[in-house]
Each structure stands twice: as C-alpha cells, then as structure tokens.
Image: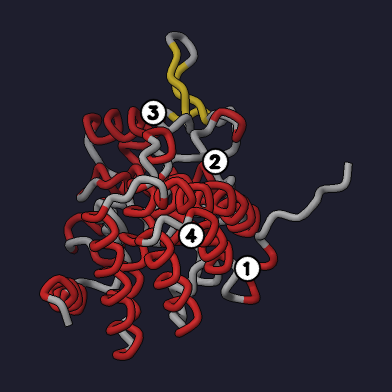
C-alpha cells in the first residue's frame, strides 16, 4: 500500500462517521452539539412549523456552533416547505424562539439570502423566496433537498447533471496529459481497493469523491472545475447507486481503473466510455440516467 493510501485510511478511521468530500464539507449535527448549545436551539413552536422534520445532518453552511446550526435549521425548514414562499421571517421572533442573539440571527439570514432562499427589503422585511429564486447548485441546498420531500427529484436531477458533466470531463482530461493528476487518480483507485477489501466505507467514499474532483480538475476547463463542488455534494447525498459509494463493488473499482488507464494512454473516447459505464454500474441508477422526454 502506498504512503498516501495508508495515511488517508488511517485518518478516515479516526474521523467521525460523516462523509466528507473534497474540501471536507463540515458537518455539525444538532444531536452532537455541546449540551449548552443544544438547549439554546429549541424547536420553533407553532401549528404550521415542525422543526423536528428538519433534523437531518447537513453541512450547515460550513459553520459551527449556533450560527451554523441556525442556518441549517432555517434552511432545511425552507427547503422542506415548512416555511413556505413569501413567509415573513421576523429576526426578533427567530431570536426569541431559538434563544440566540440578534447577531447570530442577522448573520444566518445573510447566509440564507446569499443562497437565494430569503430576501430582505426595506419596509418589507425578510421573506422566504420561491424555489425559482434558489441557488439550486449550492451544496447546502443540494443536501437539504436530498433529505427532504424533494429527494427523488434531487436524485434524478443530480444524476442527469453528472451524466452531462463527468463523461465530458473524462474526455477532456485524456487530452491534457497531466501526469501529476493521473498519479493521484491512480492513488485514489488504490485507496478504494484497500477500503473495499476492509469494508471501510468512509475511506472508500472519500477517495471516490477525491477521484471525481481530480478528474474534473484534469479536464482543464475552469467552468467545469467550478462544478466540482456539485459533484462532491452529489456523491455525498446520492445514497450510493450512482457511484456505488454506499456499497463499493469490484465492478465500480474496475471502471475507475479503466478511466485511469485511458487517461494515461490519451484515449479520450475510452475515458468517456469508462465514465459512462461507471455512472450506470449499479442497476438502480437507471432511474436517473437521462431518457428521451415526451413533449
């Protein structure tokens, strides 16, 4: 086993059970928060809002503590429909309900506004925005949708998007001859192989996410590279079928290896074909592979 593989597998075993992709998306579950902070984040009581429905783990806007938790809770409530479009969000009420400071509320609403979930206007206040205004490519929103009522739509849309992005990235990467990235891709395949043999799902998933991120980097297209975060989020929330993250198999590992071999030989068509085979390696992915639409 290479030094890189050994280091990565050791680190993964000592980490918590949350899966992290490139950039180590930060997860901070309400259930795991310190007791003092758990007490502060009380349910928003009301007949039309049930905060308990938004209890899934999330990246919480990469934040920790009260600010990150409030972003996560409000974001999940909006995406799940508990807080419908045009619903007014009164900062003072939020502060009282969750027992957090005005600063925490203000900063949390700013984060949600940047994601397109809410808007703040003079003399109107802060209101929930319709789905058409949301930044649906934001990793947090991808995750919140994946664990809410829209999860089936989210899975299908992510699958269709990946089917468009990654075969193209593989084809382009074969023409760039980036030996440094090709070696790192080979290292990720080695790590996934050892993880598969040991039943180490966390390490295998992290190596898989890194593999796909590196491949997009190798494409040499900056606009595609900006989409790498979307692929990483898709890998985390897909539940496994699209890439066999949940249940790694010898078949998916072989397709990863074929991609690396095709890149090394400059075989653009082979790299693209191997990526398409990887994306459908699990039977359940047939549900998200694009099919002709009836009009």
Q: Please report whichever mark, 1 or 4, sits nearer to the chain's N-terminal start.
A: 4
The circle on residue 114 is 3
10 lies left or right of 200: left
Mark closer to the observer (1, 2):
1
Q: CA–CA distance between discs 1 and 4?
A: 20 Å
Residue at numbered disc 4: 271
Mark closer to the observer (4, 3):
4
Q: Please report whichever mark, 1 or 3, sits nearer to the chain's N-terminal start.
A: 3
Q: Please report whichever mark, 1 or 2, sits nearer to the chain's N-terminal start.
A: 2
Q: In the displayed image of the protein, which residue is found farthest to the top? A: 123
Q: Is residue 144 visible?
A: no
68 lies left or right of 232: left
Residue 291 location, quadrant: bottom right
Q: Please report whichever mark, 4 or 3, sits nearer to the chain's N-terminal start.
A: 3
Residue at numbered disc 1: 285
Mark closer to the observer (2, 4):
4
Q: Residues within 10 Å of mark 3 (few under 14, many from 20)?
A: few
- Give the image location of residue 136, x and y in percent: 52, 39
- Give the image location of residue 153, x and y in percent: 65, 53
Mark closer to the observer (3, 2):
3
Q: In the displayed image of the protein, which residue is found farthest to the bottom? A: 198
- Does the CB distance between marks 1 and 3 fall below 8 Å? no
Q: CA–CA distance between discs 1 and 3?
A: 32 Å
The local secondary structure at tag 1 comes to helix
The local secondary structure at tag 2 comes to loop
Q: CA–CA distance between discs 4 and 3?
A: 37 Å
Q: Residue at x 49, y 53 (%)?
A: 268
Q: Residue at x 29, y 59 (%)?
A: 182
If the image is split into quadrants, where does the N terminus sit?
bottom left
Q: Residues within 10 Å of mark 4 (few under 14, many from 20)?
A: many
Q: Residues within 10 Å of mark 1 (few under 14, many from 20)?
A: some
The circle on residue 83 is 2
């Amino acid at each position: 086993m290479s030094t890189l593989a050994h280091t990565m597998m050791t680190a993964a075993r000592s980490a918590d059970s949350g899966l992290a992709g490139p950039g180590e998306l930060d997860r901070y579950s309400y259930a795991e928060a310190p007791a003092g902070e758990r007490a502060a984040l009380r349910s928003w009581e009301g007949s039309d809002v049930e905060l308990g429905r938004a209890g899934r783990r999330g990246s919480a806007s990469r934040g920790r503590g009260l600010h990150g938790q409030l972003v996560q809770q409000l974001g999940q409530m909006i995406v799940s429909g508990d807080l419908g479009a045009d619903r007014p969000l009164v900062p003072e009420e939020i502060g009282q309900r969750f027992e957090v400071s005005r600063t925490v509320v203000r900063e949390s609403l700013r984060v949600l506004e940047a994601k397109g979930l809410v808007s703040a206007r003079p003399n109107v206040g802060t209101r929930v925005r319709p789905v058409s205004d949301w930044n649906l490519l934001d990793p947090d929103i991808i995750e919140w949708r994946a664990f809410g009522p829209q999860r089936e739509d989210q899975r299908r849309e992510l699958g269709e998007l990946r089917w468009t992005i990654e075969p193209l990235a593989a084809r382009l990467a074969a023409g760039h001859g980036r030996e440094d990235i090709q070696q790192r891709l080979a290292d990720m395949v080695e790590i996934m192989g050892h993880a598969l043999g040991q039943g180490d799902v966390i390490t295998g998933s992290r190596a898989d996410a890194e593999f796909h991120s590196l491949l997009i980097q190798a494409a040499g297209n900056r606009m595609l590279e900006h989409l790498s975060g979307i692929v990483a989020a898709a890998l985390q929330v897909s539940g496994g079928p699209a890439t066999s993250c949940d249940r790694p198999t010898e078949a998916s590992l072989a397709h990863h290896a074929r991609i690396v071999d095709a890149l090394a030989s400059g075989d653009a068509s082979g790299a693209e074909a191997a990526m398409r085979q990887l994306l459908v390696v699990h039977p359940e992915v047939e549900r998200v592979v694009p099919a002709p639409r009836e009009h």
